[in-house]
């Protein structure tokens, strides 16, 4: 094959590739990017599907990277809406518009379904996670070492756990660290000695056993009543005023239809007056 | 014929030597283009190195380089940056991978070149090369589904451990080590082997005492390349290592490597935390350079000793 034919061929390939790749450079028209907490992710995906069904021209894309990653994405503009499964810290608040609370979720402590421990106090959970209690038999369980499963530092679920249970104490350094609620659930599901924490809303489909805390069975009703004290808000966070499509999505989520969907999936919605007047949830030590 | 020789020939041929002149010009253009492309590669490497140093050194200086490397407290939200557990983790996992990868890889190479009949080689060699094409996530996935429960049930510990990571990385290293070792072993001149056998040595004695020694520098190059893959591997390690912040005390303990830490935290890190992740990149750079230098010095010294 001679030189100029080859040159022509290469030029053609480059041209075709550039033309084909270019449309991908434009922002996908109309898709609202919702990035953040892995706890919020399954609910946001469900809402996004229903949103698309009702508004065929509009779409919402959901990504689960962790709460702090979601805030980061909202801050630097890669996401239209950042989702978060914890309160914003004092340092973070000035960066954003006031967050919208779409629901409240319980924080469940989970163990393998063969673990005969049913009920723990907050102090016992803290002792487990600081590494003070090393063997399940100290709590009346089987003679097996305790294996802790925790989330990465940017996780809203972890922040909520630390704020509600650990307080100033550090989680033991031998805790296994994973990046999503799903991963924690899988690990606890496969390891009879494991204990971890995850979003209550995601527990019902899994084969893991949520523990009672201070005698209270975790459930959406208990979160609503305030008897189950471990709960945290699901937030939608934005840096700028939302675009028309994003506003439409938020309006759908906060509408009675959206809120009913969340309630049916096990979250506590703000519409119910009891939840609205709830002060900050039970802190470590209680 | 050099380009200058051609030019002289062109002038000698007369004004109608334009075809030759065009060819010479094309050749100069092509070599200039290729030089620019090569310079781009070096430029890219220089820019990456410069960027990582620029982003990572300030925080290392602020925390103190010795404190950064030797402290075991990694609490970025509190401003504590100590990466010792991750350094030990990287070294442990790479060391283990080297043990498994070199034994298996070198073993494969020896069997393929010295002991296998040709018919089996035609099946085995492509199969091993196919192993190189499998994405690392798949190895991690198989590790999680099969290897981790096996270690947990039969050897103890959480299953997610240094052992699991080393095994997975060793298998990932295997095709690299094997193919380069095969080339090195096949490059040994036939008369070395024939001479040895003529002197009465068995095939195994010939292999260990003559062939491997002659191919030593190539085999070490294979191990260096394999080790490079093992140190940089992130995805598979995150899936099977457990990612705990402790310094591992046994191969059954969970561990976090430098690469896993960067991957786990980079999506949400900002400010000093992000700089600290770049500083971990700097440490990785330095570690890899040290390991490579040791290996190269070792191979050069042995090659000299072998030649003398």
Image (cartoon, rainbow, N blue to C red):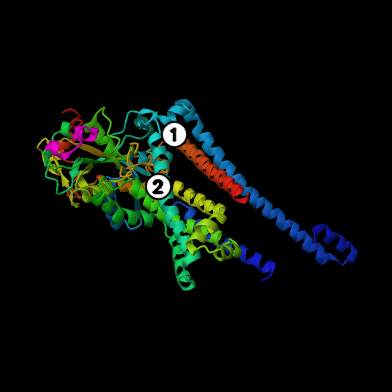
Residue found at x 47% / y 26%: B62
Q: Nearer the viewer, residue B223 or B78?
A: B223
Q: Which residue is mark 2?
A: B96
Q: What is the x, y in percent for residue A227? A: 11, 36
Give SS at disc 2.
helix
Q: Which residues are magenta?
A: A125-139
Give SS at disc 1.
helix
Residue found at x 34% / y 50%: B164
User: Quadrant where the N terminus of chain B lies?
Assistant: bottom right
Mark with earlier residue (2, 1): 2
Q: Nearer the viewer, residue A22 or A210?
A: A210
Q: Is residue B186 visible?
A: yes
Q: Which residue is mark 1?
A: B276
Q: CA distance from mark 2 to mark 1?
A: 27 Å
Q: What is the x, y in percent for residue A113? A: 15, 49
Answer few, some or many: residues within 10 Å of disc 1's Cα (few below 14, many 20 plus, some between 14 and 19). Answer: many
Answer few, some or many: residues within 10 Å of disc 2's Cα (few below 14, many 20 plus, some between 14 and 19). Answer: many
Q: Is residue A136 magenta?
A: yes
């Amino acid at each position: 094959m001679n030189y100029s034919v080859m040159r022509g061929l290469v030029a053609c390939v480059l041209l075709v590739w550039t033309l084909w790749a270019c449309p991908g450079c434009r922002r996908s028209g109309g898709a609202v990017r919702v990035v953040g907490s892995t706890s919020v992710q399954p609910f946001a995906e469900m809402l996004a599907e229903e949103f698309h069904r009702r508004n065929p021209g509009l779409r919402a894309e959901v990504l689960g990277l962790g709460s702090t990653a979601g805030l980061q994405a909202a801050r630097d503009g890669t996401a239209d809406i950042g989702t978060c499964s914890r309160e914003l810290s004092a340092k973070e608040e000035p960066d954003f518009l006031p967050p919208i609370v779409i629901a409240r979720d319980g924080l469940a402590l989970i163990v393998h379904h063969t673990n005969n421990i049913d009920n723990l106090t907050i102090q016992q959970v803290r002792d487990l996670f600081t590494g003070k209690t090393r063997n399940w038999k100290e709590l009346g369980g089987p003679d097996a070492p305790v294996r802790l499963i925790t989330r990465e530092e940017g996780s809203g679920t972890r922040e909520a756990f630390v704020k509600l249970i650990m307080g100033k104490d550090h989680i033991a350094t031998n805790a296994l660290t994973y990046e999503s609620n799903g991963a924690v659930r899988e690990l606890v599901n496969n390891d009879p000695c494991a204990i971890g924490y995850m979003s209550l809303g995601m527990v019902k489909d899994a084969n893991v056993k949520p523990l009672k805390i201070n005698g209270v069975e975790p459930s959406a009703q208990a979160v609503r009543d305030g008897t189950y004290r471990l709960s945290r808000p699901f937030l939608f966070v934005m840096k700028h005023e939302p675009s028309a499509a994003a506003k439409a999505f938020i309006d759908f989520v906060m509408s009675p239809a959206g809120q009913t969907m969340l309630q049916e999936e096990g979250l506590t919605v703000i519409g119910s007056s009891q939840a609205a007047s709830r002060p900050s949830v039970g802190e470590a030590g209680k | 014929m050099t380009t200058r020789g051609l030019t002289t020939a062109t002038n000698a041929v007369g004004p109608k030597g334009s075809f030759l002149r065009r060819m010479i010009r094309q050749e100069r253009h092509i070599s200039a283009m290729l030089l620019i492309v090569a310079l781009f590669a070096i430029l890219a490497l220089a820019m990456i190195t410069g960027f990582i140093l620029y982003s990572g050194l300030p925080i290392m200086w602020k925390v103190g380089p010795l404190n950064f490397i030797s402290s075991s407290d990694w609490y970025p939200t509190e401003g504590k940056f100590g990466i010792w557990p991750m350094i030990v983790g990287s070294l442990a996992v790479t060391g283990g991978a080297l043990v498994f990868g070199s034994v298996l890889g070198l073993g494969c190479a020896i069997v393929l070149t010295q002991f296998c009949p040709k018919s089996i080689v035609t099946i085995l060699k492509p199969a091993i090369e196919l192993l190189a094409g499998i994405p690392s996530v798949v190895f991690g996935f198989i590790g999680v589904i099969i290897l981790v429960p096996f270690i947990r049930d039969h050897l103890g510990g959480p299953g997610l451990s240094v052992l699991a990571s080393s095994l997975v990385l060793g298998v990932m290293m295997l095709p690299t080590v094997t193919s380069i070792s095969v080339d090195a072993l096949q490059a040994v001149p036939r008369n070395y082997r024939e001479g040895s056998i003529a002197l009465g040595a068995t095939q195994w004695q010939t292999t260990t005492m003559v062939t491997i020694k002659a191919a030593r520098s190539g085999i070490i190059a294979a191990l260096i390349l394999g080790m490079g893959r093992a140190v940089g591997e992130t995805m598979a390690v995150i899936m099977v290592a457990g990612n705990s912040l402790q310094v591992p005390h046994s191969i059954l303990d969970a561990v976090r490597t430098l690469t896993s830490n960067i991957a786990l935290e980079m999506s949400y890190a900002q400010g000093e935390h992000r700089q600290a992740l770049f500083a971990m990149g700097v440490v990785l750079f330095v570690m890899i350079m040290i390991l490579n230098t040791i290996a190269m010095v070792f191979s050069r010294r042995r090659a000299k000793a072998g030649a003398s």
